[in-house]
Amino acid sequence: MARPASDKRERLTAAAVRLATTRGLAATTLGALAEEAGVPSGSVYYYFKTREDVARAVIDALRDRQRDLVASWEAEEDPRARLAACIAYHLATADDLRAHGSPVAAVCAELRRSGDPLATDAADIVATLVSWVAAQFAAMGFGPDAARARATHLVTGLEGAATLAHALDDRVPLEREAAHLGRWIAQTRSP
């Protein structure tokens, strides 16, 4: 029995994300995408006609993934616990981050290097995370500027540690930074 078309699109999108975040968008050709998704190459064109279509699908999938993660972190009642859940997620994915780096940062960097206008859309994923983290600090009583500064620090720590873990092929930098940020959050006192 043939799989529904929506299943094929989901498989192609998942394959695009895997390829883009492990090999890069440039290597995510329509042929590679067909092979990764296990679909005939001719059917890829039905869903993705251009490289831009593939990049857009990757960005949308990464945005959706982050939205789902944030929703799961929001289940925590306390802003400190929500931030701890964010940090714990990064630690739980340390092996993938070590192997491939931050998926969003990798896509952003590649799009920026190529001058692709979609780089702004990819960067919005990071900006949205920073804003969410800032909202947690605001819920702890910090003013807008202080909350934003703390959010930038936390996201920079996680993304930087992911980059270092990837560069060194060692998850220890991420483990240490996650532990440091966890202590920092636990010890942060409202103003």
Image: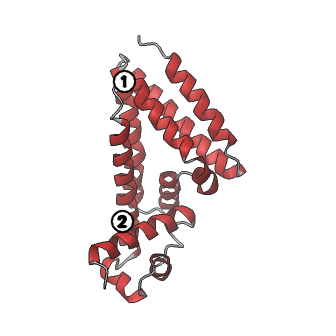
Q: What number is the disc on residue 57?
A: 2
> Whole-percent x and y of residue 43?
35, 85
> Whole-percent x and y of residue 126?
42, 45
Between 57 and 79, the one lying in front of the other is 79
User: How many marks on residues?
Assistant: 2
Q: What number is the disc on residue 184?
A: none
> Whole-percent x and y of residue 156?
53, 37
Is any part of residue 118 visible from this angle? yes
Three-letter code, disc 2 = Ala
Quadrant in which the N terminus appears? bottom left
Helix, strand or loop at disc 1? loop
Determine whether 97 is above or below 19 in the image: above
Query: Mark 2 and mark 1: span between their CA atoms?
Result: 34 Å
Which one is closest to the eye, mark 2 or mark 1?
1
How many residues crowd mark 2 within 10 Å: few (<14), some (14–19), many (20+)?
many
Residue drawn at point x = 38 percent, y = 37 percent:
73
How many residues crowd mark 1 within 10 Å: few (<14), some (14–19), many (20+)?
few
Residue drawn at point x = 40 percent, y = 55 percent:
62
Q: Earlier in the sequence, mark 2 or mark 1?
A: 2
Three-letter code, disc 1 = Asp
Asked whether, in this view, residue 64 is left or right of residue 108, the answer is left
Between 180 and 115, the one lying in front of the other is 180
> Whole-percent x and y of residue 31?
48, 83
Quadrant of the image occupied by residue 161:
top right
Q: What number is the disc on residue 78?
A: 1
Asked whether, in this view, residue 34 is left or right of residue 100, the answer is left
Residue drawn at point x = 63 percent, y = 51 percent:
98
Quadrant of the image occupied by residue 49:
bottom left
Which residue is situated farthest in the top direction here?
191
Is any part of residue 52 visible from this angle? no
